Amino acid sequence: MQLEHLKDLVVEVLNDMKARDISVMDVRGKTAVTDYMIVASGTSDRHVKAIAETVAYKAKEAGEAPLGTEGVQEGEWALVDLNGVVVHLMLPKVRDFYSLERLWSAPTLVSHPAASASA
């Protein structure tokens, strides 16, 4: 699967799952770990967990099995590593604390302040 298609698939799943504040950062040239980091918020630990599981499932279904996942059981911060796309899903308080967008200072390609009004 092409990297751009994978990125678009993840954003589509996030929107379908009513993730909030979706940000896509192009980090090529800033890290060798991945090309895109996608950060989104869930409304509860169960929501974060469900989003992470669905992203992993849909990526695998499309032929891109995750290299790994972290934090899915806890649900405050889950990570889905799709190699060229790393997805961070967090509760808003955790996201505010770590402020990954500011940390990476990457231009935001897609920003949906309120991807959905409610979950």
Image: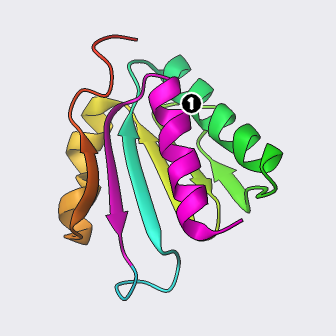
Q: In which quarter of the image is residue 97?
A: top left
Image x and y of residue 46, in percent: 55, 18
In the rendered image, residue 117 lying in the magenta stretch gets the answer no
Give the residue drawn at x 33%, y 10%: 118
The residue carrying pointer 1 sits among few (fewer than 14), some (14 to 19) or many (20 or more) residues within 10 Å by Cα, namely many
| 5 w.r.t. 35: above or below | above
Tell which of 71 and 108 is nearer to you: 108
**Which corner quadrant holds the C terminus?**
top left
Q: Is residue 12 left or right of residue 29?
A: right
| 12 w.r.t. 37: above or below | above
- Look at the image and name its color scheme: rainbow
Give the residue drawn at x 43%, y 18%: 44
Residue ranking furthest to the top: 118
Q: In this view, does 112 lie to the left or right of 17?
A: left
Which residue carries the number 1 mark? 51
Image x and y of residue 66, in percent: 73, 56
Residue type at mark 1? Ile
Which stretch did the figure color magenta?
1-27
Tell which of 13 and 33 is nearer to you: 13
| 37 w.r.t. 110: above or below | below
Q: Is residue 59 left or right of residue 35?
A: right
- Provide the secondary structure element on which disc 1 rests: helix
Tally the marks.
1
Image x and y of residue 88, in percent: 46, 49
Image x and y of residue 49, in percent: 59, 28
Q: In which quarter of the image is residue 42?
A: top left
Give the residue drawn at x 40%, y 37%: 90
**Which corner quadrant holds the N terminus?**
bottom right
In the rendered image, residue 2 lying in the magenta stretch gets the answer yes
Give the residue drawn at x 29%, y 42%: 95
Q: Is residue 118 left or right of residue 86?
A: left
Q: Quadrant of residue 91?
A: top left
